[in-house]
Amino acid sequence: MNDQIQTKITKTILASALKEQGEAFVTRDLGVQREILEGLEDTINAPQVLVITGLRRVGKSTLLAQIANKYLKEGFYFVNFEDERLLNFQVSDFDLLHETLISLFGEKKTFLFDEIQNVPEWERFVRRLHDQGYKFIVTGSNASLLSQELGTRLTGRSVRIELFPFSFREYLKFKKVKTPNLEVLTTKQKGNLRKLANEYMAFGGIPDALKYPELAVHKALYDDVLYRDIATRYKLDNVRSLKELAFYLVSI
């Protein structure tokens, strides 16, 4: 009984978390504008639920902020379900969530749900309010929001896009290098571009890994994908064999 009282989501905790999240979200560093952003207007204006998937740490939350800044001038609700204060959030808490959002920010018609996969059966609430005319944009990792699973959860109600690491053009923007005219390059430009291309091939396009090169972001990402997205998801007992197979594949 005591455990149930301690883990229950209360309106006070919820209101505090949502207020802090909202304030942090609207002041978030938007970073490098993703190339995919320009082509999303029709999808955002369409009634379907927009589902943004992608590798961990690929920048889904930042893309969500860019979408809000560019397209959602009439307002929105933002909820980050990675917040530890929402750790025990259940599908039965969504009505309380909606009530609390209205009391804090007034009535809005658009919900932005970050890392929605942390809530079991989240699609029940989304489907119910979507049918009432609300718009949803949700993010989650590839491992939890596979297209075939969404097909049964939100049949005919969702559009899925996948976000990838920085392209080379986005990498150049991150490095604050103006993309030269590729048809007319000087010898110096060719040399500098080749150097940047080699760096891009070596370090990749994971935003956090580029922003914080002193941290072992790639190693942490590799372990998360291997152990959390694969081993845990598929309940694999022989993790050692999985690790050896992964090492072999990346070494080819």
Image: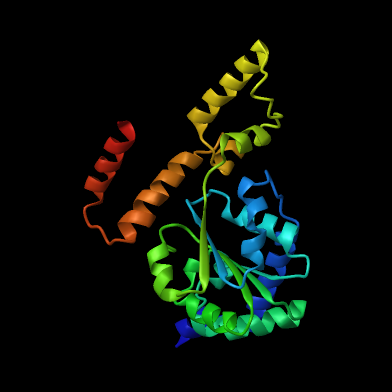
Residue 70 coordinates in the image, percent (x, y): 74, 57
Q: How is the image coloured?
A: rainbow
Give 214 or 142, whichever is nearer the viewer.
142
Apparent side of residue 69 relative to residue 144 in the rendered image (left or right): right
Q: Nearer the viewer, residue 168 or 9?
A: 168
- Note whether 145 is above or below 110 in the view shown: above
Task: Examine the rendered structure and indicate whether residue 25 appears above or below residue 38.
Answer: below
Q: Is residue 171 visible?
A: yes
Question: Does residue 35 sit above or below 47 in this rendering?
Answer: above
Q: Residue at x 45, y 77 (%)?
A: 121
- Toward the bottom, the furthest residue is 1
On the picture, is 69 further left or further right than 89? right
* Residue 96 image point, x, y percent: 61, 85
Q: In the figure, is residue 46 to the left or right of 252?
A: right
Furthest-top residue in this view:
187
Give the image quarter of residue 12: bottom right
Question: Can you say which quadrant of the picture contains the C terminus?
Answer: top left
Residue drawn at x 26%, y 47% is 242
Please name the residue shown 68% across and 19% down the image: 184
Task: Tell me, yes or no, if residue 8 can be seen here.
Answer: no
Q: Position of residue 196 (x, y in %)?
A: 59, 24
Give the camera-side residue of 169 and 22: 169
Outermost residue to the front: 183
Q: Please provide percent x and percent y for residue 124.
A: 49, 81
Residue sitting at x 64%, y 72%:
111
Residue toward you, 154 or 45: 45
Quadrant of the image containing the N terminus: bottom left
Number of numbered tags placed on the structure image: 0
